Image (tube, helix red, strand yellow):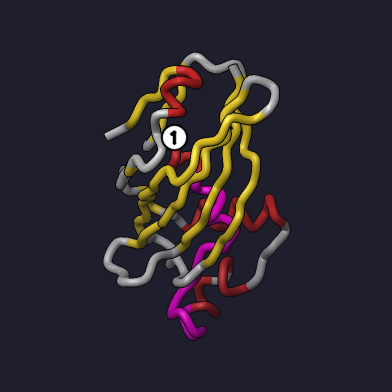
């Protein structure tokens, strides 16, 4: 279920709120190949299914940074922010990739708002702890603390 925050007052009330899990998303080989083109990272473990089948993961895997970039669409399924002038990705405090995402796997995001701070310029900073899980895997694909700023 998606949480909706109305303006800065709505965001200020989110400390400690559990967001998720969200919907499953399949990570296709086409998406992996597209990311390889965009990032100019064509390492065989990502883009050569034949060679990767004999490699350490038994097939191609998503780039860690592709998995991280999927926070954007996955997070939009968890939280909608209304009545703000602008929202920006302010950065990351910590990121780890405990398990690879095999091509064709499904992932989903869970998150928790851990801190909400007022910032200069009539803004609010939201820090969220995220876990991207892989369907059928004990280990997550990614754990990260992301920081967003929203301005009235």
Residue 41 in percent (x, y) is at: 69, 63
Residue 13 at x, y = what percent? Answer: 39, 29
Image quadrant where one finds the N terminus: top left
Q: State which region is magenta.
A: 53-71
User: Left or right of 41: which side holds 81?
Assistant: left
The total number of labels drawn is 1
State the SS at label 1: helix
| Crowding at mark 1 (Cα within 10 Å: few <14, some 14-19, many 20+) | few
Image location of residue 115, percent across then percent down: 49, 42
Task: Determine the residue positioned at 61% across, 73% down.
Answer: 44
Q: Is residue 80 above or below residue 78?
A: above
7 is within the stretch colored magenta: no
What residue appears at the point 52 percent right and 44 percent down from the top-left corner?
A: 127
Q: Is residue 133 left or right of residue 70?
A: left
- Residue 2, quarter of picture: top left
On the picture, is 69 further left or further right than 105? Answer: right
Query: Which residue is located at x 36 percent, y 25 percent?
Result: 4
The percent position of residue 34, horizontal first and vertical second, equals 60, 51
On screen, residue 15 above or below 85:
below
Residue at the spot of label 1: 76
Q: Residue at x 55, y 80 (%)?
A: 51
Image height of 129 relative to 41, above or below: above
* Screen quadrant of the C terminus: top right
């Amino acid at each position: 279920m998606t949480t909706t925050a109305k303006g800065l007052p709505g965001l200020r009330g989110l400390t400690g709120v559990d967001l998720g899990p969200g919907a499953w998303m399949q990570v296709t080989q086409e998406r992996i190949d597209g990311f390889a083109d965009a990032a100019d990272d064509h390492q065989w473990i990502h883009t050569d299914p034949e060679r990767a089948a004999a490699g350490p993961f038994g097939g191609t895997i998503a780039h860690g940074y592709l998995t991280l970039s999927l926070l954007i669409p996955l997070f939009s399924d968890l939280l909608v922010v209304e009545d703000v002038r602008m929202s920006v990705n302010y950065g990351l405090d910590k990121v780890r990739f405990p398990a690879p995402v095999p091509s064709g796997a499904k992932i989903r995001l869970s998150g928790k708002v851990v801190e909400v701070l007022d910032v200069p310029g009539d803004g609010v900073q939201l820090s969220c702890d995220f876990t991207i899980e892989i369907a059928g895997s004990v280990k997550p694909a990614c754990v990260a603390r992301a920081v967003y700023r929203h301005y009235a």
